[in-house]
Image: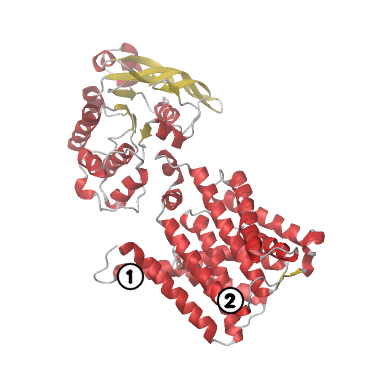
Amino acid sequence: MKGAWPYVGIAVVTLAMWALLVSVNAFYAGVLASILIWTVATSGLNVIAGLGGYPSLVQGAFYGIGAYASALALIHGQNLWVATLLAVVSAGLAGLLIGLVFARTRGQYFGMGTLFFGVVVALVLTNWTGLTQGPLGLMVPFGFATNDQLDWIVPLSAGASLALVQALGTSRLGLRLVTVRADEDLAEHIGVPTARTKLAGLVISAMIGGFAGMLIAQYNGTISPDLFDQTVGFVMFVAVAVGGAGRVLGPLVGSAFIVGVPDVLNLPSGIGLLVVGVIFVVIVIVVPDGLMGGVDAIRRRLPGFRA
Amino acid sequence: MTVLLRVEGVSKVFGGLRAVDEMDLSVPAGTVFGVIGPNGSGKTTFLGLLSGTHKADGGRITLEGQRIDGLAAHLTVRAGIARTFQTTRLFAGWTLGANLAAAARPGSPPPDDVLALTGLTARTGQVCASLSNAEQRLAMIAVALATRPKLLLLDEPAVGMSPPEAASLSRTIARIRDELGLSVLIVEHNMHLMMNLADRIVAMNAGRKLAEGTPGEIRSNPDVIASYLGT
């Protein structure tokens, strides 16, 4: 039964998010939906960057690939199921490609490689105008039956992504990713196929990112390359770090700060990034394990705490 | 006696340095095999070649007749070779039990057995960073055993141990050989431990095999005395 409690917690959080989403005004509903869609994308990132400890800066590109793949499928007359499948598979294939190239690299080299790929994807989305209409972006056909469906699908997707990371964290792959994060050389010497583990982690991150891309395309109704450039990939990484890398609720908390604070304060994008930077620096100094890491540290100090 | 590990003409070059030069060795099943030599003689590099940490530049290594040179470290572990390190290497922030669980695979010995063998039963729930040096070094052996090896490579397992701790370690290694039937290859500078524990010893110097024999033969070998043991 102990193993069920995290899922109960995630279900409660999901219900609370849904209740909030349907009860606040349109502006705050928009902010909350953005936070929840980012929660999906950053939960994906939490697999390779959180569990695996690898600084992947390419999640924005997977998000974009998912958004464009689903949008193009819908534009060409496919239904939302096909569009979603294409979003997930195409992002997963991109993750596989990056993983095959960079899974044997480490630390900053992995980070630089993924950043490079993020730049390439942004350039392709901007310049392949025949397919993407370049900076003008695409109008995305609405694939759901009604707008109201998004009100429960978005929080449900966020909850599902959190639950998926919780399940992965206790799986064999999750344990292997955590050994890679703790000491990759030692992991290899106790029999963990580290390169394959990182590859699997990156592909799963990418697939979840692709799904989030489909959601944002549906929610916004329009997409353009600036929504998915390398800055987005970097800020998603910051969101995971702020929330607590490897902590299941970290992506939700991180996204709330990184997306929610600038949006609620209605800051211009440049100023918003500046605020995000300040939040990041303060949190890294005060709670290096992120906000959820700080919460865990406080819990451990409470009387009667048992791990 | 069945040969478990066979090393034939194995070399490793770093830049212009031949760290291991045409090494030959046969480790019989169920024996403790010692590797001695002065600092820089290539002992740890040799261990790295056996464990997949380094790739050999020449020669062949077989375990139970299967070639293992060129395998990645994790595949070498699956083939049946586990190792410990000269400097303590554990998932230091995890409990000992969690370290064992991370290393376990189908068919691994029960953690309780491994803990009992290494005398760490009472430490299973303790974070590894909080264990004493001797316990941490035993914990490395426990983790290596949890991978279900046929050959255990120990790189200076007695470093930093007091004489009673080293004697206890020696008894543990003898039990690993006698009760589990594993072969153990040890690199160690503690000559008292080595001479009393090893069934055979190979002495290395400048990356090459200088001599091989029983502890008594090695102790009286003039080349070994001149290059390492002293008078």
Q: How many marks?
A: 2
In the picture provided, is B35 more to the left or to the right than A106? left
In the picture provided, is B165 more to the left or to the right than B107? left
Q: Which residue is painted at 24% across and 71% down in the image?
A: A303
Q: Secondary structure at mark 1?
A: helix
Which image quadrant for residue A204? bottom right
User: x%, y% of residue A69?
Assistant: 69, 60
Of pointers 2 and 1, the one earlier in the residue sequence? 2
Task: Name the disc covering residue B37, or none.
Answer: none
User: x%, y% of residue A61?
Assistant: 65, 59
Q: Amino acid at mark 2?
A: Gln
Q: Is residue A61 visible?
A: no
- Circle 1 residue: A299
How far apart, in angstroms, are the residues tagged by discs 2 and 1?
37 Å
Pick whichever, A167 or A178, lies toward us: A167
Q: Is residue A52 visible?
A: yes
Figure quadrant of the C terminus of chain A: bottom left
B15 shown above or below B3: below
Pick whichever, B30 or B126, lies toward us: B30
Q: Amino acid at mark 1?
A: Arg
- Circle 2 residue: A149
In the picture provided, is B191 more to the left or to the right than A288? left
User: x%, y% of residue B197?
Assistant: 23, 25
**Label 1: chain?**
A
CB under 8 Å between discs 2 and 1: no
User: x%, y% of residue B70?
Assistant: 51, 28
In the picture provided, is B133 more to the left or to the right than A236? left
